[in-house]
C-alpha cells in the first residue's frame, strides 16, 4: 500500500529557528538550534541583561518540543549606541582607590597610575556595553514573543525534516517485510531437506548400514525443531506491524518507542540467523540487519 499521501506527524530533533523584534530603537535577536538528545535540554546563551527571562524561555520551548538539546542565542543592539562600549566607572573608581591605598601603605610612588589605569580599563569585567543594560518590561515581553516565533519556526523545520525521515524509514520497513517473506519461503520444506541430507550422508558411509525409518524420523524431527524459525518470523511480523502502526500514527514523541521496536526486530533477526542452517537464509538475514541499521540511524533523530 502506498503512503504517498500520508501526512506524518513525525518530527526530527534537528532544526533551526530565528526571529527579530525592534522595540523603541532596540533590536532583539533570537536564534534557536536543536540537535539530538534523549531528553529536553535547553541552554541559553545571552548577556546578563537577559538573565531574568531564561526560565520563561525554557518554558516556551517545552510547549512545542518534547526532546532535543536546544541552544538559544539572545542578543540586544541599541541602535542609538551602536555597540558603544564604556568603562564601568564605579568598578574603576574602586580599583583606583585600592591602588592609591596600596601605594600609601607601602610608600610606593604613584606615578605609574597611567599604566595601571590602562591595564585595568581593558579588563573585560571593567567594561560595560549596551548588551549589559537592564531590559525594561516592554523589551522583556518582546523578547519572549520573539522566542515564541523562533520556536514555531524551529518546530516547522523539524516537521519538514520529519517528513523526510518518515518516507525513508517507511521504505526501509517495506524492505524488511519483503525480506521476512523471503526467509519464510526459503524455510518452507526445511524438514524434508534435512531428511534428504541425512539419508545422503548415511549412504556415503556404507551401503550396508541399515537405517531405522522411525529413528531417522525422530532425528529429523529433532533437528527440524532446532532450525524452525516460524515463531521468530511470527514475532518479527508483529514487531514490524507495531513499528509501522507507530510510524503512521499521529502521536507525538514516538522516537523512544520506535527505538525500542528496532531493538526487538534486531533480536528476532539474530535468533533467525543463529537457528537457520541455510546459506540463503543467512544472506537474507545479513540484508535485513543492514537495512535495520539504517533504520536505527534514522530513528535516533526522531523526536
Image (cartoon, rainbow, N blue to C red):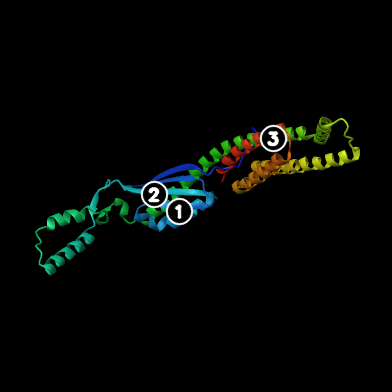
Tell us which disc is closer to us: 2 or 3: 3
Q: Nearer the viewer, residue 100 or 270?
A: 270
**Residue found at x 90% / y 40%:** 214
Residue at the farthest bottom position:
105
Residue in view at x 40 percent, y 58 percent = 52
Please tell me which of labels 1 and 2 falls first in the chain: 1
Q: Which residue is labeled 3 in the image?
A: 282
Tell me whether the residue at label 3 lies in contact with that at label 1, contact meaning CB atoms closer than 8 angstroms. no
**Which mark is drawn over residue 57?**
1
Does dot 1 land on a helix, a strand or a loop? helix
> Is residue 174 among what the camera can see?
no
Residue 256 percent location from the top left of the image: 60, 48
Total labels drawn:
3
Mark 1 and 2 residues: CB-CB less than 8 Å, in contact?
A: yes
Q: Which residue is mark 2?
A: 74
**Image quadrant in which you'd find residue 49:** bottom left
Label 3, label 1: how far apart the Cα atoms are: 53 Å
Label 2 to label 3: alpha-carbon separation = 55 Å
* Element type at mark 2: strand
Relative to 249, residue 89 above or below? below
Which numbered disc flags the more N-terminal residue, 3 or 1? 1
Residues under numbered marks 2 and 3 in contact, where contact means CB atoms less than 8 Å apart: no
| Local crowd size for mark 2, using a 10 Å CA cut-off: few (<14), some (14–19), many (≥20) | many
* Local secondary structure at mark 3: helix
Amino acid at each position: 500500500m502506498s503512503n504517498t499521501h500520508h501526512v506524518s506527524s513525525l518530527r526530527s530533533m534537528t532544526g533551526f529557528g530565528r526571529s527579530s523584534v525592534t522595540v523603541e530603537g532596540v533590536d532583539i535577536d533570537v536564534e534557536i538550534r536543536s540537535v539530538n538528545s534523549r531528553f529536553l535540554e535547553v541552554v541559553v546563551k545571552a548577556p546578563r541583561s537577559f538573565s531574568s527571562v531564561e526560565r520563561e524561555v525554557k518554558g516556551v520551548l517545552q510547549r512545542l518540543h518534547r526532546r532535543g538539546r536546544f541552544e538559544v542565542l539572545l542578543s540586544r543592539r541599541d541602535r542609538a549606541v551602536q555597540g558603544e562600549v564604556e568603562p564601568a566607572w564605579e568598578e574603576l573608581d574602586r580599583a583606583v582607590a585600592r591602588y592609591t591605598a596600596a601605594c600609601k601603605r607601602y610608600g610606593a610612588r604613584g606615578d605609574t597610575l597611567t599604566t595601571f589605569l590602562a591595564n585595568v580599563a581593558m579588563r573585560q569585567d571593567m567594561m560595560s556595553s549596551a548588551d549589559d543594560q537592564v531590559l525594561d518590561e516592554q523589551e522583556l515581553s518582546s523578547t519572549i514573543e520573539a522566542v515564541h516565533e523562533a520556536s514555531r519556526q524551529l518546530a516547522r523545520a523539524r516537521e519538514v525534516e520529519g517528513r523526510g525521515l518518515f518516507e525513508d524509514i517507511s521504505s526501509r520497513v517495506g524492505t524488511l517485510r519483503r525480506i521476512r517473506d523471503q526467509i519464510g519461503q526459503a524455510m518452507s520444506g526445511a524438514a524434508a531437506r534435512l531428511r534428504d541430507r541425512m539419508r545422503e550422508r548415511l549412504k556415503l558411509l556404507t551401503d550396508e548400514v541399515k537405517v531405522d525409518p522411525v529413528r531417522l524420523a525422530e532425528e529429523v524431527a529433532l533437528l527440524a525443531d532446532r532450525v524452525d524459525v516460524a515463531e521468530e518470523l511470527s514475532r518479527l511480523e508483529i514487531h514490524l506491524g507495531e513499528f509501522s502502526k507507530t510510524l503512521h500514527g499521529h502521536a507525538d514523541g514516538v522516537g523512544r518507542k520506535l527505538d525500542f521496536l528496532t531493538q526487538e526486530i534486531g533480536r528476532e533477526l539474530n535468533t533467525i540467523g543463529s537457528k537457520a542452517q541455510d546459506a540463503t537464509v543467512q544472506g537474507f538475514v545479513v540484508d535485513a540487519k543492514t537495512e535495520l541499521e539504517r533504520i536505527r540511524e534514522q530513528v535516533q533523530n526522531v523526536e
